[in-house]
Image (cartoon, grey):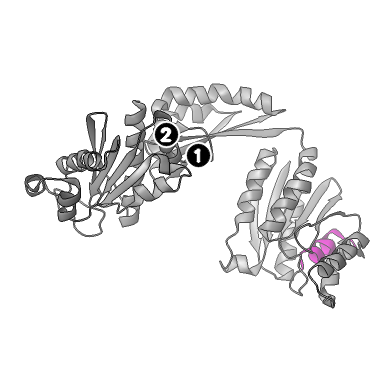
Amino acid sequence: MVVEIISVGTELLLGNIVNTNTAYLAKKCAGLGLSCYHQTVVGDNPKRLEDTFKQAYDRSDVVILGGGLGPTNDDLTKETVAKVMGLKLVEDKETLESIKAHFVKIGWKDIPDNNWKQALAPEGAIVVANSNGTAPGLIIPKDGKHVILMPGPPNEMIPMFEHDIEPYLRSLSDKILCSKMLKLVGTGESKAADMIKDILDTQTNPTVAPYAKTGQVHFRVTAMADSEEAGEELLKPMIDKLYERFGNMIYTTDEDETLEEVVVKLLSKKGLTITTAESCTGGLIGSMLVNVPGVSSVYKEGYITYSNEAKGKLLGVSEDTLSEYGAVSAETAKEMAEGGAKVSGADVCVAVTGIAGPEGGTAEKPVGLVYMACSYNGKTVVEKHNFSGNRQKVRDNSVVKALDLVRRMVAEV
C-alpha cells in the first residue's frame, strides 16, 4: 500500500518549527510495510490545502495529515478533507464531553466558542481520543482508501499514533518491513558503494541503501516479509555479505548506537580509562565522549593544548620536536598521546593536531592536514589524514577518525 504524508502549517513553511513529525511518521510507516513516495508541507491556505489533498488522495491508498485541527479560524484541515471527500461534519458527543472535561480540569469556567468546532467530525469517521489535548484524531475509511488526521504538536501526535493509528495501519497490510543499519568508518560513500556494486546492481529483497554521514557511511538493509522472523532470515545472508566486504570497518548494526557509545562500551568492558589531548579539535572529542551516559567510569580528564606552549607545559612535548617538525606533525601527535597518557595515568590517550583552516595552510602542510595518535598498552599508532571542506567539517571528521582509531586499537582489530 502507498502512503502519503501531508504536514499542515504555515509555521513549518517559514521554518519557525522544525518538521520532525514527517520523519517520525515516514519511519513508522516504512516499518509497517507501507511505501511512501511523496511528502508535502502546505501552509494554512484553504485552496492550496485542498489541491494538495486532492492530489494525494488520488494517487495514494493512505493519506496522513498532521496539523490544522486546532480551534482557530486558520485550522482548516478537517473542513477541507470533508469537503473534498463529500462528507458532512457532524457533532461527536464523546469529543464534546471530552472538551468540557478538559476545561473543567484546568479551571476554566468560560469555554471559548471556537473550541466547539473541534467536536465536529466528518460523517462516518472513526474519532480517535486525544489524551494530551483537545483536538481528536480522525480515521476516515472510504472507497478502499484511508485518510488519517492527527494534531500537529508531537507530544499529542506521537502518543496518538502509537496507541491508535499504528495498530489500525498494521491491520491494513499483510507485510512488514524489517531493516538493519550497518555503520562503518574507514571509507567514503562512493568507494563503499563500489565495493558492493555487484550487490547493489542485483538486489531485490532485501535491498541495500548507502547513506553518507560525516566521516562515516551507513548502509540500511531492508527486507519485506510476512513476519519479523521471516524478515530476520532474509536480512542475515545480506548482512553476512556486507561483513565479508567491510569487516572491522563496521562498528555497529544498532541504528541508535553511536561511535562514541561503542568506544565507551569497549573501554568499560575492558576496564580501561582514557584521556584526550586535543589541538585543532579544541575539546570536541572529549565533548562527544561525555555525551555518553556512564562515561565517568572511563573518562577522567582531557587536555586542550592549542598553543605550542600548552603542548609542552601540559603534555611534555619537547621544544626540539616542535621546532624541527612543527605542531602539525606525526612526531608531535605521538608525543602528545604518550605525554597525555603519562601525566593523566590513563590506559589510553588519543591526540589530535592539525590545520582546520581556513587560514594557516602551506604547500607542505595544507588546510585539512591532521595527524592523530593513540597510545595504548605500550604502543603508539600515528595516522595522517587530509580532510576537505570548511573548518567545522575538518574538525568533525577528525573527531570521527580519532574515535575510530581508539576503537580499533583497543579492540585490536
Q: Residue at x 28, y 39 (%)?
A: 349
Up-down relation of residue 246 to residue 25 (above or below): above
Task: Look at the image and tell me whether residue 216 can be seen.
Answer: yes
Q: Is residue 26 magenta?
A: no
Q: Which mark is residue 257?
A: 1
In the displayed structure image, the side of residue 148 where residue 257 appears, left or right: left
* Viewer-nearest residue: 179 or 164: 164
Disc number lying in front (2 or 1): 2
Task: Look at the image and tell me whether residue 61 can be seen.
Answer: no
Residue type marked 2: Ser
Residue range highlighted in magenta: 76-88
> Crowdedness of circle 2 by 10 Å Cα count: few (<14), some, many (20+)?
some
Label 2 sits on residue = 268
Which comes sooner in the sequence, label 2 or label 1?
1
> Crowdedness of circle 1 by 10 Å Cα count: few (<14), some, many (20+)?
few
Chief SS of the magenta region: helix
Residue 260: x and y in percent read 42, 41
Residue type marked 1: Glu
Residue 127: x and y in percent read 85, 55
* Viewer-nearest residue: 349 or 245: 349
**Quarter of the image where the N terminus is located:** top right
Element at label 2 = helix
**Quarter of the image where the C terminus is located:** top left
Residue 7: x and y in percent read 67, 59
Q: Is residue 84 magenta?
A: yes
